[in-house]
Image (cartoon, grey):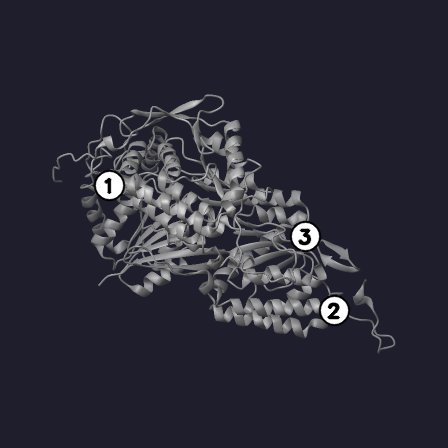
């Protein structure tokens, strides 16, 4: 349904201004460096290339230390701001065919994760009672740069991006529903999310995902949106080269259910610090 | 160095049989195709025993036994599983002298270490996870966490019984059954552990031990009826296992190699730091994945620190692992000795300066003198590759930023050390090190309550503590 070509009801002869759906990399909206587009529901959408994927990894890596170094409180504020912006732009998503209830669920999911930012470390970390005169504490830290093959729905997309970034990871997302994804990128771009924290690529993930799965500077791979088991297995094998953490497809299928902690903990490392006690 | 009279621990506390079968379904039996291999004492090259090399049919039988045992074992009340584990812990305590001597004989590590570090930690690990067996609903993994099924566990030769404990204790506590393959050069303590299981009346099939080399391990991890793979060993083999497991849905945890930086700042207490450096790299002959194999010392104190370190190294006693005065025992195998020697020669060839204290090494067995390289750069192979031996590479730095950058300049991320008297600096540096375990003003400390495991290519998952349960729960 080419929504953007509709003539406004109020004006007798005014054409609407169509939106160009571009990529979202490093906080900017570039076209694919390849110059390629493809048509989805009447819209021309950027068809991301291998080079775009690599540029997105660079942007994600560059943004990661600072984002991880932001206070947990601040990251929570930013995620809450994303929820506010998504709520405000609800109409844009329903115009794209996303059910209003799903937009609400996505907003609520963002609010839920926003609150986790400064609580997850207390739930998953803490003091360890070792048998000796030592201060010993474990705390979660973000894994780093996460490549995500996202599910097509808005709720699915939010449900894979939010748990990754709330703890300080940055992501390169291969998005399935391009108009919805890029509209979400526009939400992110106006929500105080630093450029590079979320990078969204539209196109054919089967083409770009292998490059991310084998990329040396990607720390984890979320395959939630991969539909073909054989491709998922191939990507998991490619990820073994640098021992990436892998979230397999099927880990989360019902995005309306309580996600639990796993979407966050799967992208966290536990660091344990020892120090002697003594006068 | 003071002359000490020899103080050997008696071998008579351990009775090693001439040959060993596989431990499958609660019984020892020979392998189907009759292949055996010898395990030797690396300190003397004396053959200790002949051990069965498990073939594919043997692994099939072991996995089948573990599968049969899984139903009853996983449906036992947690409190009952706990009591088996408490029994095992007690039996290990009671037999700890015997097991310590056995471990030193088969591995080459000093008796002081197997007696004072390995065995106490082994028993403590079983005690720790025994207590979890009936408390899993409170562990933070949901109200009704379930076991996975049959766990395939492959362990290395550097801490044979301790690595077994790290694998077996959490697996059993959570209701899984296991097939474990010990390393081919150190199979004996796992076979003695099989006897501990029998003494504890552990139901047949809950623990199965298959001995063999890499082929046996490869067959085990790719077995279709295995639900979980846990591996400790080299990063290369870890990659291969991750590839094998891809697409199968098996859960996987990997504890792999390391190239830990041990960072000494200019305000560090020098004597304590020197002890920490020595413990960091020479503990267990440097056969430690988390060994502090890269010393990063602040330039302004490098000269003083190195002089101290050399003085201290000159007092290290290398020799008979069963002698209670021994600090550094035998290298575990001829193959490992060859690798250490090769990388050390490369270190010298690449321009680093090699130094070892004067020390006489025994004529038989596999030995390597404690060694340091100075003038090492980050491009040198001895600064990048895991040597897994008593060889320390020394680099310098000027600022904390440089120290952190150099420390993190490795694909590994298992452990790191920080030496400084300034609390805020320790905490800031600890925050920025990409490593799973950070020892500040100490090194190589382990505890069953403390999670252990790596970042990046040092693997994934944690062993120890509450965190260690996750690897075995659905």
Task: Please identify the residue farthest to the top as the structure is shown.
Answer: B34
Q: Chain of mark 3?
A: A
Q: Nearer the viewer, residue B453 or A168?
A: B453
Indicate the position of residue B295 as horizontal and vertical percent values. Answer: 31, 48
**Viewed as shown, does residue B417 lie left or right of B357?**
right
Find out whether the residues at labels 1 and 2 contact each other: C-beta distance under 8 Å. no
- Looking at the rendered structure, which numbered label has been put on residue B254? none
SS category of the residue bearing label 2 = helix
Indicate the position of residue B42 as horizontal and vertical percent values. Answer: 30, 29
Crowdedness near tag 1: few (<14), some (14–19) or many (≥20) residues, C-alpha within 10 Å: many
Indicate the position of residue A4 as horizontal and vertical percent values. Answer: 79, 67
Measure the C-alpha gap from mark 1 to mark 2: 71 Å
**Viewed as shown, does residue A163 lie left or right of A4?**
left
SS category of the residue bearing label 3 = loop
Instruction: List the residue tagged with mark 2.
Output: A94
Measure the C-alpha gap from mark 3 to mark 1: 65 Å
- Looking at the rendered structure, which numbered label has been put on residue A34? 3
**Looking at the picture, do discs 1 and 2 lie on one chain?**
no
The picture quadrant where one finds residue B268 is bottom left
**Viewed as shown, does residue B220 lie left or right of A179?**
left
Indicate the position of residue A83 as horizontal and vertical percent values. Answer: 61, 71
Q: Chain of mark 2?
A: A
Crowdedness near tag 2: few (<14), some (14–19) or many (≥20) residues, C-alpha within 10 Å: some
Q: Nearer the viewer, mark 2 or mark 3?
A: 2
**Looking at the picture, do discs 3 and 1 lie on one chain?**
no
Measure the C-alpha gap from mark 2 to mark 3: 31 Å
Q: Nearer the viewer, residue A60 or B77?
A: B77
Q: Residue at x 67, y 70 (%)?
A: A104
Instruction: List the residue tagged with mark 1.
Output: B112
């Amino acid at each position: 349904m080419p929504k953007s070509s509709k003539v406004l009801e109020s004006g007798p002869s005014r054409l609407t201004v169509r939106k160009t759906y571009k990529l979202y990399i490093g906080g900017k909206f570039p076209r694919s460096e390849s110059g390629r587009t493809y048509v989805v529901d009447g819209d021309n959408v950027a068809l991301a290339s291998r080079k775009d994927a690599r540029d997105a990894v660079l942007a994600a890596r560059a943004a990661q230390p600072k984002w991880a170094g932001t206070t947990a409180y601040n990251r929570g504020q930013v995620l809450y701001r994303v929820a506010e912006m998504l709520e405000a732009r609800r109409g844009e998503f329903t115009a794209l065919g996303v059910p209003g209830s799903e937009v609400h669920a996505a907003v609520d999911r963002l609010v839920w994760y926003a609150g986790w930012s400064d609580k997850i470390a207390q739930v998953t970390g803490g003091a360890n009672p070792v048998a000796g005169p030592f201060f010993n504490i474990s705390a979660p830290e973000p894994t780093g740069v996460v490549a995500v093959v996202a599910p097509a729905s808005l709720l699915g997309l939010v449900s894979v991006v939010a748990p990754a970034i709330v703890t300080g990871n940055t992501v390169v997302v291969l998005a399935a529903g391009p108009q919805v994804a890029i509209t979400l990128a526009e939400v992110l771009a106006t929500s105080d999310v630093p450029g590079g924290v979320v990078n969204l690529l539209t196109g054919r993930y089967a083409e770009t995902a292998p490059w991310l799965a084998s990329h040396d500077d990607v720390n984890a791979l979320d395959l939630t949106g991969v539909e073909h088991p054989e491709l998922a297995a191939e990507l998991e094998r490619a990820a073994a080269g640098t021992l990436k953490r892998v979230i397999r497809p099927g880990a989360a299928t019902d995005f309306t259910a309580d996600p639990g902690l796993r979407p966050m903990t799967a992208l966290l490392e536990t660091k344990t610090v020892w120090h002697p006690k003594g006068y | 160095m003071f002359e000490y009279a020899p103080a050997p621990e008696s071998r008579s506390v351990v009775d090693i049989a001439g040959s060993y079968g596989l431990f499958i379904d609660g019984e020892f039996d020979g392998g189907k195709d009759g292949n055996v291999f010898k395990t030797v004492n690396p300190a003397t090259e004396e053959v200790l025993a002949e051990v069965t090399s498990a073939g594919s049919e043997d692994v099939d039988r072991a996995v089948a036994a573990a599968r049969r045992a899984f139903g009853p074992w996983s449906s036992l009340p947690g409190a009952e599983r706990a009591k088996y584990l408490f029994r095992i812990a007690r039996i290990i305590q009671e037999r700890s002298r015997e097991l310590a001597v056995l471990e030193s004989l088969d591995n080459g590590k000093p008796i002081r270490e197997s007696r004072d570090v390995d065995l106490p930690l082994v028993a403590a690990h079983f005690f720790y996870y025994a207590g979890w067996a009936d408390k899993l609903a409170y562990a933070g993994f949901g109200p009704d966490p379930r076991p996975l099924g049959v766990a395939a566990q492959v362990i290395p030769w550097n801490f044979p019984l301790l690595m077994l404990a790290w694998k077996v204790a959490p697996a059993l506590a959570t209701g899984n059954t296991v097939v474990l393959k010990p390393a081919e050069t150190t199979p004996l303590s796992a076979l003695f552990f099989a006897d501990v299981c029998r003494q504890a009346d552990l139901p047949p099939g809950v623990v199965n031990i298959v001995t063999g080399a890499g082929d046996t391990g490869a067959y085990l991890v790719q077995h279709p009826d295995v639900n979980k793979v846990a591996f400790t060993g080299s990063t290369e083999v870890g990659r291969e296992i991750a590839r094998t497991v891809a697409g199968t849905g098996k859960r996987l945890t990997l504890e792999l190699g390391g190239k830990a930086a041990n960072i000494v700042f200019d305000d560090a207490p020098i004597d304590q730091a020197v002890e920490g450096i020595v413990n960091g790299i020479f503990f267990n002959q440097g056969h430690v994945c988390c060994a502090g194999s890269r010393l990063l010392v602040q330039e302004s104190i490098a000269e003083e620190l190195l002089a101290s370190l050399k003085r201290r190294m000159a007092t290290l006693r290398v020799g008979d692992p069963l002698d209670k005065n021994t600090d550094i025992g035998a290298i575990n195998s001829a193959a490992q000795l060859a690798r250490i020697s090769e990388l050390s020669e490369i270190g010298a060839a690449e321009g680093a300066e090699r130094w070892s204290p004067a020390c006489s090494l025994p004529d038989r067995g596999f030995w390597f003198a404690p060694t340091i390289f100075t003038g090492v750069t980050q491009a040198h192979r001895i600064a990048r590759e895991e040597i897994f031996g008593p060889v320390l590479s020394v680099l310098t730095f000027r600022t904390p930023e440089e120290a952190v950058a150099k420390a993190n300049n490795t694909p590994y991320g298992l452990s790191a050390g920080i030496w400084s008297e300034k609390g805020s600096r320790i905490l800031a540096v600890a925050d920025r090190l990409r490593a799973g375990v950070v020892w500040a003003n100490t090194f190589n400390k382990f505890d069953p309550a403390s999670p252990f495991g790596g970042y990046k290519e040092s693997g994934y998952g944690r062993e120890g503590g509450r965190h260690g349960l996750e690897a075995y729960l659905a």
